[in-house]
Image (cartoon, rainbow, N blue to C red):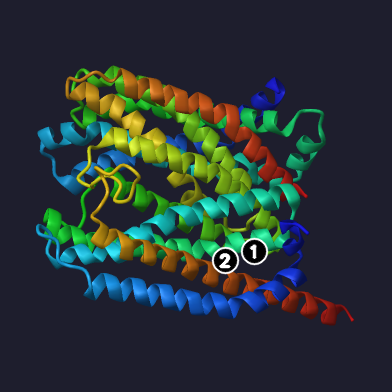
């Protein structure tokens, strides 16, 4: 399993697409917001937590179809499926590799991009923490969506339609755990539930994803 | 003699062939009686005036929107566990009806909301959850449309329906956390305090039964169409080979 993780990481780093691209996309989304709503810094400060969360979520979405697509096309997914590793484990490792190459860089970049949006001081820590805890759920749900659409020729758009509704709870609790702090309220409930969603997702969704892969590899 | 016998498409077709005319007639009676009673023979509400009458469309369609998803969840499970084709096809047949019911509930709600709350749309938890349900239906239907092989499509949509159900329920409670609402609580319940007055609730029950019958009729019709389409494509495939 570790070997699989390392292989995926190496592929993602050396092919040079994934991780830089999502970061650049994130930067552009954040940059576009002032163009859309105007450069007024109080307005920006008000919406900054939401923008950072939505931007990270969309950037995460971009690289989802790569999770299984390339391995499916060159047949290595069939090899992996017939290996002694359980398919669920493969899904978890794939999701983890996706998170390490997408979710983690986005999490690290978010506080920096917060400067551009005049993010309130108290929120920096929580933007970082909530993304750190929340993005694994996004990767895992994304792996599920990718597993469902892997057999389709043009699954990209469909993948977004399937995955985005599943992101709603994560987005709500993630953004709330920042927004509540900005408003000077207690965010513990939101943050704990966000963590619970992440753990819950990693515990159960790989089974569904593995089932979907089995159907697609049949 | 068990329910599972009707999982056989031929038996299902034979049974529904006999039941369908009765279903159509009953649906017509209940819908007409319920809606005409509701619209013309109930008094105006002392606060809401005649706008209250939209309840006879709004509440049944909203109930159906949720329950149709629940029905799809059950039929998806039956398909995954027992591999009965009728079950998968019934789920496929039900989805567009559920989507339409969600849309009706949203639109009638907006029309009702304008005079009562002064706004067509508000990011209220109930309204938002219906919007979310709408998107879930869209994804489900899009997945059915995207996959060519019917068995694969059945499997994948069933898995999506299971995972979607879990996350739809999560979203339902997440939006409660996120915003306080304008929408009133349940209109019908055993708890007298919350219940609407009897003059409204009796025709409302008739409407709800009408909507349920309407849904059953449509699902049976659409499932029969799906079975016929499946048979036609099987025949065509055989002809190409032979």
Q: Are marks 1 and 2 in contact (CB under 8 Å)?
A: yes
Residue A183, given in percent of the width and then of the height, sits at 17, 24
Q: CA distance from mark 1 to mark 2?
A: 6 Å
**Residue B141 left/right relative to B207:** right
Residue A23, numbered label = none
Q: Which residue is mark 1?
A: B89
| Same subunit: marks 1 and 2 | yes
**Residue A151 left/right relative to B163:** right
Looking at the rendered image, the quarter that the N terminus of chain A falls into is top right
Q: Is residue B186 above or below residue A102?
A: below
Residue at 62% x, 29% y is: A92
Residue at 57% x, 66% y is: B93
User: Which of the pair A69/B231 is nearer the observer?
Assistant: B231
- Kindly state the secondary structure of the residue where label 1 is placed: helix
Q: Which residue is mark 2?
A: B93
Q: Chain of mark 1?
A: B
């Amino acid at each position: 399993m570790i070997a699989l993780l390392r292989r995926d990481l190496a592929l993602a780093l050396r092919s040079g697409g994934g991780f830089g691209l999502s970061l650049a996309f994130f930067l552009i989304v954040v940059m576009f917001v002032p163009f859309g709503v105007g450069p007024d810094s109080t307005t920006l400060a008000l919406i900054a937590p939401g923008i950072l969360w939505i931007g990270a979520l969309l950037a995460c979405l971009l690289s989802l179809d790569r999770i299984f697509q390339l391995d499916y096309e060159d047949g290595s997914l069939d090899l992996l499926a017939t290996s002694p590793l359980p398919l669920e484990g493969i899904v978890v490792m794939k999701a983890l590799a996706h998170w390490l190459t997408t979710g983690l860089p986005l999490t690290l970049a978010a506080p920096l991009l917060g400067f551009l949006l005049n993010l309130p001081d108290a929120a920096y820590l929580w933007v970082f923490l909530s993304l750190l805890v929340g993005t694994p759920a996004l990767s895992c749900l994304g792996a599920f969506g990718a597993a469902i659409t892997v057999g389709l020729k043009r699954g990209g758009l469909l993948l977004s339609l399937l995955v985005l509704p599943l992101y709603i709870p994560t987005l709500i609790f993630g953004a709330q755990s920042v927004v509540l702090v900005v408003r000077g309220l207690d965010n513990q409930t939101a943050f704990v539930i966000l963590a619970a969603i992440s753990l819950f997702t990693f515990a159960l969704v790989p089974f569904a994803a593995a089932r979907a892969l089995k159907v697609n590899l049949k | 003699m068990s329910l599972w016998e009707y999982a056989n498409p031929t038996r299902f077709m034979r049974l529904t062939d006999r039941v369908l005319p009765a279903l159509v007639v009953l649906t017509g009676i209940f819908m007409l009686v319920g809606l005409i009673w509701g619209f013309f023979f109930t008094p105006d509400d002392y606060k809401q005036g005649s706008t209250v009458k939209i309840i006879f469309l709004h509440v049944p369609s909203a109930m159906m929107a949720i329950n149709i998803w629940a029905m799809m969840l059950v039929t998806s499970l039956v398909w995954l566990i027992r591999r009965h084709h009728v079950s998968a096809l019934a789920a496929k047949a039900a989805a567009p009806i559920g989507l339409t019911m969600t849309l009706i509930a949203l639109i009638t709600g907006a029309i009702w909301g304008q005079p009562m709350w002064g706004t067509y749309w508000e990011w209220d938890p109930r309204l938002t959850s219906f919007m979310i349900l709408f998107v879930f239906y869209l994804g489900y239907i899009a997945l059915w449309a995207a996959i060519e092989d019917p068995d694969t499509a059945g499997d994948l949509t069933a898995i999506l329906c299971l995972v979607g159900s879990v996350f739809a329920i999560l979203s339902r409670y997440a939006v409660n956390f996120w915003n306080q609402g304008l929408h009133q609580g349940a209109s019908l319940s055993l708890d007298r305090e919350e219940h609407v007055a009897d003059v409204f609730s009796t025709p409302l029950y008739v409407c709800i039964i009408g909507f349920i019958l309407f849904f059953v009729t449509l699902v049976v019709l659409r499932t029969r169409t799906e079975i016929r389409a499946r048979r036609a494509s099987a025949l065509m495939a055989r002809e190409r080979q032979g």
